[in-house]
Amino acid sequence: MERKLNLAIIGQGRSGKDIHGNYYRSERNSFYNVKYVVDKDEARRVQAIDLYPGCTPLSDYKELFNFKDIDLVVNASYSEMHYAITKDLLEHGFNVLSEKPLAANGYECRVLIETAKKNGVLLATFQNTQLAPFYLHAKRLIEDKTLGDVKQVSIRYNGFSRRWDWQTLQKKLAGNAYNTGPHPIAMALGFLDFDDNTRVIYSKLDTALTSGDAEDYVKILLGAPNKPLVDIEMNSTDGFSDYILLVQGSKGCFKCTIGEYKLKYIIDGENPKREVIEESLKDENGEPAYCSENFIVHMDEGKYDGTAFDIGTAAIYESVYRSLTEGKPLLVTPEQSTKVIEVIERAHAENPLPVKFL
């Protein structure tokens, strides 16, 4: 049996308790022992004792500096706190897994990476969608050329709803781009192989149904040389979107949600090339005709066993464990997260929104 690492988690909100906490309490967790739980809310600290038997509840993350038996600190604090708290932890010699967004801008991300290197500790980012079954499936289909030469990837994290919590406030580093954005943007960059030459072709941020001053309408187009166009949306104005990923290639088309997929494709040799006919087409009666043939198309569909919240989360935590105990490279790196934040930073720079809540 593998040795469990001692873990401290900062924050018991929706992410800390319902995503990270669910993993800690699941059968998938054979790697970590929750030793310390940090939250300013007394009720959450009391609840933590029941959720994680044997843990020590703390009210301030700085109290962790008094303990020497912590192998990993998970930073699930408010988004605007991620950078400062993570930097402080790294400077005190702790390995850190930070929730997304890693920081507010590329500069802060690079500071964190350099701080981790300087102190000889691990920095990782919790972007579990990069290891979700639906995303990895799409990546495989592209890499094995099932879809041929991919021309466009469309990513839709859309819905028709509204929010009025802290995730609607610019001062909290919130809004769809910083909150939801790390997931689809990381996938988009993955489809572009995290190419250093990736650029933001177009971006638009706006507000629609939100009660706050941060965006709930996001449109971003990404491109790189000799790579497909990636079209990203994270909008509260779409009540009809029926997919998360749509991949269009020269040999096929793939569509999926987090739970199921459909695939339509052709196989080389089954549809011989048609030569161009420059004259107007006519049918057997000499009447005008449109291109028509018995095009051989294959169909496939299926369901995924697991999501980013279970499979992806477990994969992130195992990757961190293997990195800490065996020196293996992280499956999701802070350098990748930096590129994600730089896309968000660029979109905000191109679309400044008025700050209404100071």
Image: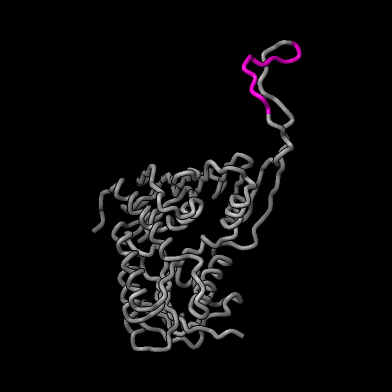
Q: Which colour assignment does the render follow?
A: one colour
Is residue 238 at all visible to an observer of this figure? no
The residue that appears at 28% across and 60% down in the rendered structure is 171
Is residue 2 at all visible to an observer of this figure? yes
Determine whether, in the image, residue 133 is placed left or right of residue 164: right
Q: Is residue 154 magenta?
A: no
Q: Residue furthest left?
A: 358
Q: Main secondary structure of the magenta part?
A: loop
Q: Residue furthest right?
A: 284
The residue that appears at 43% across and 44% down in the rendered structure is 221
Horizontal and vertical percent position of residue 157: 49, 51
The residue that appears at 67% across and 14% down in the rendered structure is 288
Q: Quadrant of the N terminus?
A: bottom right
* Magenta segment boundaries in residue numbering: 274-285
The residue that appears at 35% across and 61% down in the rendered structure is 166
Horizontal and vertical percent position of residue 223: 44, 45
Residue closer to the observer: 345 or 278: 278
Tally the numbered discs: 0
Q: Is residue 80 above or below residue 180?
A: below
Residue closer to the observer: 139 or 274: 274
Q: Quadrant of the C terminus?
A: bottom left
**Residue 43 lies in quadrant:** bottom left
Q: Residue furthest top?
A: 286
Determine whether, in the image, residue 257 is placed left or right of residue 122: right
Horizontal and vertical percent position of residue 316: 52, 69
